[in-house]
Image (cartoon, rainbow, N blue to C red):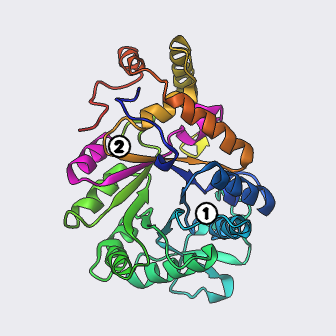
Amino acid sequence: QSTWGRTMELSRVIIGCAPIAGMHKPLGDEAAIDGLCHALKAGFVNFDTAPHYGLGLSEERIGKALAKFKETNNDVSGIKIWTKVGRVIKLKHEVSDADVVEIDNTPNHPDTIFCESPIDRVPVLDYSGTGAERSANDSLKRLGVESVFGLRVHDCDTPSRFDPTVAPDGCISKLLELKAKGITHDVSIGMNEPDVILKLIASFPEGTFDSVMVAGCWNLLDQSAHQLLVECARRQISVHNAGIFASGLLVGGNTFKYRQASDEMIARTQRWQELCHRYNVSLPAAAVAFALLPVSVSKIAAGIKQASEVDQLLVTLKQANDVPDELWTAAIEANLLPKIDLKCV
């Protein structure tokens, strides 16, 4: 076995459901639902979504896919869904003067990355306990379920979001309450900033958080989550590693951290491509294997839009089992990786 003796299994993969909300380009209900059903038929059981993704569209499409999958007598009792809180999706006429609207994620705004968001919906930032409870209840309705496996506080990476999150009547306290009621099993965090996750973890007693999802900070091009991964190993918090393909740059795309990749990152990716060729492994397979190196990483997340991408993911996951550990030594020697403990312990 490669990857420090760890074998890839589908139960260790989370299907990221931001792309099915029409991220960057329209997809449509039919293609999204077919892709999700294809993933379910292939044996994937973990799915991550958020109200943020298409202003509820991702959750609605998951709900439709689960309903379609059940129509053919398929058992969905083992399906695990994580969604997020921090944004309440309101209809335009519901918005009050006191609401903090996330303007750059409103439909048709030039900076939004979700081009299919329903035009009558508005994202309102709300990290209070009341906001978290409404967000969770709305998500359950969109998903068509009575509970979800996990709830993550989403993107509380500024003081105006962080402070209400950690308040006594804030988001985290409400998530613990919802866990006690059986609405969720997994109290989690989801964001792109490892330093903020560390700060949030340190604000509560050990045992508060069951998992964290960190995106885009532990992959072949970015290892800035190292300290977070070490701390999660110490606290026995499971890490769900997202953004393992660096926003698509490691699988033939041209974006990095959700924006056009720089010439420097494109050149670095080409160097990785050449090194992988020397070891007869594909770059995406190396990306998967690397994402699993830290002992605290229990799951990786990979986004899909349609059925063909599910098939390609299956191929990549199988190839990842054959990535030799010698690749990491060579990458360190080539200054493609830092000289750190890649197990993060």
Residue 266 in magenta stretch: no
Label 2: state its secondary structure. Answer: loop
For residue 252, the mark is none
> Residue 21, relative to residue 264: is it above or below?
below
Label 1: state its secondary structure. Answer: loop
Q: How dense is the environment of label 2, judged by Cα within 10 Å: few (below 14), some, or many (20 and up)? A: many
Residue 63, visible in the rendered structure:
yes
Residue linked to disc 2 = 225
Q: Is residue 344 left or right of residue 217?
A: left
Residue type, mark 2 in image: Ala
Residue type, mark 1 in image: Tyr
Viewer-proximal residue among 332 and 238: 238
Q: Residue 345 in the image: state x and y as whole percent.
A: 23, 38
Residue 221, visible in the rendered structure:
no
Q: Quadrant of residue 55?
A: bottom right
> Residue 252, relative to residue 117: is it above or below?
above
Q: Residue 162 in the image: state x and y as whole percent.
A: 35, 68
For residue 53, the mark is 1
Whichever of callouts 1 and 2 sits on the residue coming sooner in the sequence is: 1
Q: Quadrant of residue 138?
A: bottom right
Residue 228 in magenta stretch: yes
Magenta segment range?
226-255
Q: For marks 1 and 2, give the CA distance.
A: 24 Å
Q: Residue 305 in the image: state x and y as whole percent.
A: 69, 50
Pick out the residue farthest to the front. Answer: 73
- Quadrant that contains the N terminus: top left
Q: Residue 116 in the image: state x and y as whole percent.
A: 74, 63
Residue at image location 50% in from the left, 14% down from the top:
279
Residue at image location 43% in from the left, 48% down from the top:
299
Viewer-proximal residue among 93 and 11: 11
